[in-house]
Image (spheres, helix red, strand yellow):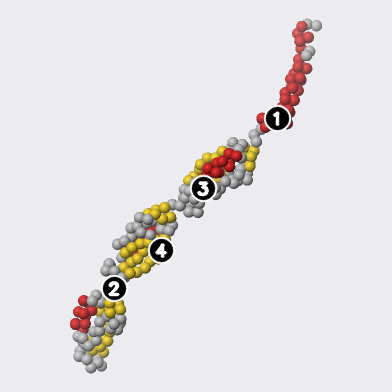
Amino acid sequence: MSWRGAARRPLPFLVVGTIGFLLAYVIVALFVFPATLTATDVAVPNVTGIPYADATAMLAKAGLKAARGEQRYDNTAPSGAVLAQNPLPGGKQPAGFTVVLDVSRGQRLIEVPRLVGLTRQQAQQTLENAGLEVGVVSQADNDAPLGQVLSTTPAAGARVPVPSPVGFTVSAGPAAVSIPDITGQDVNAARALLTQLGFVVGTVSYDSTSNLPPNAVISQTPSAGSPAHAGARIDITLAGRP
């Protein structure tokens, strides 16, 4: 027998022995030391609603990492609180997996725009354009034109959350005055007096049965002594025919 034939005889035993050793090593590694070869999955905790720093610590304790995601305004969550997380809580992820956290920027604050001097309609449009709401609208006697904004609550420049109501006061015109008694006067004299006080002659009607001189004022509506603002219309009835 040649030396080559002698060398070939133990070769199959050597191959089988090597394969058996490798299989035994794998079995021992998998069942005796499984953590060295397989990743450990951990449960993702719920960290929504808590501060970002606390959420990061909680994830780290669970074997996970945290990353800051979207930051957005939220009127219900304080600044820095976690609004949402990805992946969602309750699932399993490999140890060291990164959980993305969306964080609140708190309430969005803006300055109340200046409304004084605007008309009521202009003020309402300005507030709507700013994302604010129209609050209580009141009136006050003032020499400013009727309907002009006199003041706002809160005042212009104050920082308020969006949306917030902003109330304002508008001018009701000059203080109300008593309507004078113009009955018995000639229409021209009555008209001049009403105009001087800021009133306007409204509807003019006639009564041919009156005993007063033609074009004398028989009656007026509203009646004398009634309070009215400048610009109010006074209807009159004259004696005679048109």
Q: Earlier in the sequence, mark 2 or mark 1?
A: 1
- Residue 173 vs residue 202, the one in the foreground: 173
Left or right of residue 206: residue 71:
right
Total numbered circles: 4
Question: Residue at point 30% right, 81% down?
Answer: 226
- Mark 4–mark 3 distance (CA, rounded to whole Å): 30 Å
Which labelled disc corresponds to residue 135? 4
Kind of residue at disc 2: Ala
Mark 1 is surrounded, within 10 Å at the Cα level, by few (under 14), some (14 to 19) or many (20 or more) other residues, namely few
- Mark 1–mark 3 distance (CA, rounded to whole Å): 41 Å
- Mark 2–mark 1 distance (CA, rounded to whole Å): 94 Å
Which labelled disc corresponds to residue 208? none
- Mark 4–mark 2 distance (CA, rounded to whole Å): 24 Å
Cβ–Cβ under 8 Å for marks 2 and 3 = no
- Mark 1–mark 4 distance (CA, rounded to whole Å): 70 Å
Residue 126, how many percent across, how many down? Answer: 36, 59
| Disc 4 element | strand
Which labelled disc corresponds to residue 81? 3
Which labelled disc corresponds to residue 33? 1
Kind of residue at disc 3: Ala
| Disc 1 element | loop
Question: Residue at point 69% right, 31% down?
Answer: 34
Kind of residue at disc 4: Gly
Which residue carries the number 2 mark?
A: 175
Determine the image quadrant of residue 235. Answer: bottom left
